[in-house]
Amino acid sequence: MMNLTRESLEKYNDKSGKEEETNYIKVGMSTCGIAAGSDRVYLSLLDEINNKNIPVKLDKCGCLGMCYAEPMIEVKIENQPAVFYGYVKEEDVPEIIEKSMQGQIIENLVFKSDNIQKKIVLRNCGLINPESIEDYLSKSGYQALKKSIFELNPDLVIEEMKKSGLRGRGGAGFPTHLKWTFTKNVQSEEKFVICNADEGDPGAYMDRSVLEGDPHSVIEGMMIAAFATGSPKGIFYIRAEYPLAIERIQKAINDCYKCGILGSNVLGSDFKFDIEIRLGAGAFVCGEETALIASIEGKRGYPKPRPPFPAVKGLWNKPTVINNVETLANVAYILLHGGESFGSIGTEKSKGTKVFALTGKIKNSGLVEVPMGVTLRQIIEEIGGGILNNKKIKAVQTGGPSGGLIPVDYLDTQVSYEHLDQLGSIMGSGGMIVLDEDDCVVDIAKFYLGFCVDESCGKCAPCRIGGIQMLNLLEKISSGNGEIKDLQRLKLISKAMQKASLCGLGQTAPNPIVSALRYFEAEYLEHINDKKCSSGKCKALNTYLIITETCVKCGMCQKNCPVGAIEGDRTVGFTIKPEVCIKCNKCFEICKFNAIKK
């Protein structure tokens, strides 16, 4: 592997933007693809190509974002446009090879995506081999770093970031240029840049996908941040549950050292930068900056009061820039295309694009990257394909455990920091979970609060005590023992936690409850006054009856009841003993004749 300098990077720059001429097949080999069987598809393609001596280059790539269509492959044959195939199985491989070499397309496997996405963070994911530094170099890789070192200076780099309007994508939305400026202005020989890859929100996997699909873009972003702030040392803080991401980041770091991109003389300049990986043990609170720093220092992941902020006094009490994966993945693009170009995308206060993990009761789950300012409805209907099983949408949860519920009436709201905040939710790191009419807001609030209670570090009383008190009140309501005054108690404790908790975990943990009470108070009242859960999710409020007129006396409900709560026989019919029933829902699920009423 050659030692790269300013001059030797030029040959790669000449290749950028040109279409590859070789025959190739690329297989999506990120975690989602492998889970769906893309590793077996890859091996089948390899066998077919080798056994028949087909002149095709087989390669790996990251996730294209359409996780629901995995395994996915891209086929490019000379003089023909590239074709994307989705839902590929091992048995499809011989036909794909045969018809591709004949210039034919298998129409039933062709995957067609939407056209409202704009990919900046995910620009290389699914297009390059994440384990090949040459692939990244061919896509203008490290050209932004070269430009920063040899054509700009730290002040000009930060000025471009200011023009871009980039705000932190980890949740708080703090202006990136300000954070960099604070660190740059502190006089210290020792400074740090930390990539926060401790992604812990339920249903969120944006950072993992970027690390698995385009690790060098994050490394380049870290290096530009380091150059701008005068930081000679970088640390990837990655949760240990991301083995593939860790493996690919480590390979990318090793390749950068071999090429002279990392080390004492970056690209032949005087700039020095080293990177290492530190693994997190899966504590959600360690996504908070000061707790993350404590974890790296070998201490328990407790948050600290701020100020001083990490940008001024962080790791080992030295100035420290902490940006999350998505924020850093934007940096090289901004330096190459200009801050004003990036800033022209989005809304007045929310610039650029945002990556979301679209999950829940949605037809097309996966990663989406959209310009700030598109509406929730566009994301759900145009990209997500609408709701599963023709159900009615009830709400959208954004921001994970720290976010809020946005009811269906507000689906035409623009996605931006300011608009989501007005609705009582947040952008967060990018989780977006769609709920349908069968979901219960009390149950959802209880799930998220239970997560925060489990993940609380316990250091401050508002979070430690307030969280468990609110969870007990929700348990009381969902079990049919709630009182009207419990709603006021929830509101009062929420305010106390928001104002007095030490870190963002405690301050935002009440958000799902507050937003649910704001928009769905009638559903809480139904649980309290009517002792009823319309969705049937709160088991304690469910009762099951067998409708005699509909029952065909097949006996399947009795046969499948795990506790013998159904008495009778096929001669006289069946009844459910409520004192024995554990409300497991098995009889309701097994009955094909709609004879069980819940």
Image: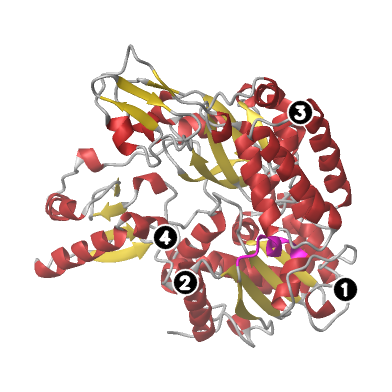
Residue 30 spot, x, y in % from top left: 41, 60
Q: Residues within 10 Å of mark 2 (few under 14, many from 20)?
A: many
Front label number (2 vs 1): 2
Amino acid at circle 2: Arg
Q: Is residue 508 above or below residue 5?
A: above
Extent of the magenta region: 282-289
Magenta stretch mostly in which secondary structure? helix
297 w.r.t. 209: above or below: below
Callout 1: SS: loop
- Count of number-bearing discs: 4
Q: Counting residues from the N terminus, which is met first, the one under dot 3 or under dot 1?
A: 1
**Which quarter shows the N terminus?**
bottom left
Residue designated by label 4:
31
Give the mark, 4 or 1, whose residue is nearer the N terminus: 4
Left or right: where 379 falls relative to 551 = right
- Residue tagged by mark 3? 483
